[in-house]
């Protein structure tokens, strides 16, 4: 009786051991996008990517105060919404029916989609020195702001990069960085000789089911997938035609990943990755 039960017992043990293993890779084929499309010339400097509730994509570019609604299947512009004067806009997210747009000096602009002319602006306490380029939405609905360079006075600029949390309901930013990326996070084994000054966050998104952080770095054209404890899941060095400066990233609720890249001498593009 004991001998007959042993294989079953071992199968449960092995199955449990398999489930206990840490995640080794993100569930995407980053070297083989499922789709990609070029964008019109007006979006050559696309700098931020978000998502409207109906599934269309929201985009800003770093020269003009327009919010663009983009067909997520074709890249066609469906709507252009003028919301403010021309500034260096770097990120966009839609929270319920409110659009939030991040400027590189740390300020957030926000407006109701029903009344884009009624624009408000709130300082976050971050500055142009931080060079804020990444804006995402965390699982709790708070906005995440990634500092590309200066991490803050309480952090080491040679050793750390910071991501801050902003509560859109209260209008307050976290006193301490919500996440701190260091060299241990981006190169845990030391094999890549990766220095933190080579990591310059230009975009951030949170996976809707795992909660993992997907952090773009325009330097090196890379993506870092990190757990919420800042353990590296995967580092991706993109080598895709047309991806010259990735700065926008967003997920659909089902996990489809969209990454936008500025165009430079080529058209800007959006790359689509379906979850495996």
Image (cartoon, rainbow, N blue to C red):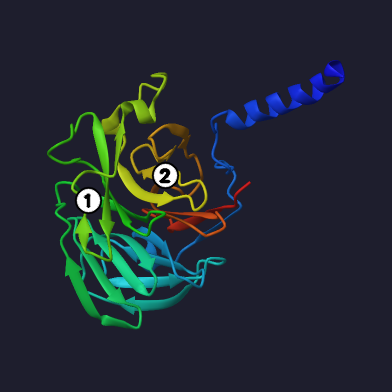
- Where does residue 160 sit, x and y in percent of width and height? 25, 33
Q: Position of residue 107 (x, y in %)?
A: 19, 60
The residue shown at (38%, 65%) is 59
Q: Which residue is mark 1?
A: 174
In what element is the residue under mark 1? loop
Front residue of 2/246: it is 2
Report x, y in % for residue 10: 75, 22
Closer-to-camera residue (246/255): 255
123 or 40: nearer the eye?
123
Q: Residues within 10 Å of mark 2 (few under 14, many from 20)?
A: many
The image shows residue 17, relative to residue 92, as above or below, that is above
Which residue position is annotated with label 2?
213
Q: Which residue is painted at 60% across and 52% down in the image?
A: 274
Of circles 1 and 2, the one toward us is 1
Residue reaching furthest to the front? 1
Which image quadrant is residue 18 in? Answer: top right
Q: Residue at x 58, y 42 (%)?
A: 27
Query: Does 74 sit left or right of 166 as displayed?
Result: right
Residue 215 placement (x, y as % from top left): 39, 44
**Quadrant of residue 113 in the image?**
bottom left
Drawn side of residue 119 relative to residue 270, left or right: left
Q: Residue furthest left?
A: 153
Q: Earlier in the sequence, mark 1 or mark 2?
A: 1
Asked if the residues shown at circle 1 and circle 2 are in contact, with their CB atoms under 8 angstroms apart, the answer is no
Residue 40: in sight, yes or no?
no
Cα gap from disc 1 to disc 2, whole angstroms: 18 Å
Q: Is any atom of residue 256 visible in this view?
A: yes
How many numbered dots are placed on residues in this image? 2
The 10 Å Cα crowd at callout 1, few under 14, some 14 to 19, many 20 or more, is some
Element type at marker 2? strand
Is 265 situated above or below 223?
A: below
């Amino acid at each position: 009786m004991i001998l007959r039960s042993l294989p079953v017992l071992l199968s449960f043990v092995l199955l449990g051991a398999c489930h206990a293993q840490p995640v080794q890779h993100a569930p995407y084929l980053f070297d083989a996008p499922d789709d990609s499309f070029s964008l019109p010339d007006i979006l050559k400097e696309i700098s931020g990517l978000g998502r409207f509730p109906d599934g269309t994509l929201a985009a800003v570019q770093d020269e003009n105060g327009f919010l663009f609604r983009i067909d997520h299947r074709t890249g066609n512009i469906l709507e252009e919404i003028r919301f403010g004067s021309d500034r260096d806009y770097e990120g966009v997210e839609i929270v319920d029916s409110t659009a939030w747009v991040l400027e590189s000096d740390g300020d957030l602009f926000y407006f109701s989609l029903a009344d884009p002319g009624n624009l408000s602006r709130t300082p976050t306490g971050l500055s142009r020195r931080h060079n804020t380029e990444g804006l995402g939405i965390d699982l709790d609905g708070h906005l995440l702001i990634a500092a590309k360079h200066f991490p803050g006075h309480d952090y080491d600029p040679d050793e750390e990069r910071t991501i801050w949390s902003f509560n859109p309901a209260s209008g307050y930013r976290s006193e301490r960085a919500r996440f701190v990326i260091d060299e241990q996070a981006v190169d845990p084994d030391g094999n890549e000789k990766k220095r933190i000054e080579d990591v310059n966050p230009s975009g951030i998104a949170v996976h809707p089911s795992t909660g993992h952080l997907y952090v773009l770095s325009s330097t090196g054209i890379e993506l870092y997938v990190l757990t919420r404890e800042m353990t590296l899941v995967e580092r991706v060095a993109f080598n895709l035609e047309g991806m010259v400066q990735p700065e926008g990233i967003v997920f659909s609720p089902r996990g489809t990943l969209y990454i936008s890249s500025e165009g430079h001498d080529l058209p800007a593009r959006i790359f689509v990755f379906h979850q495996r």
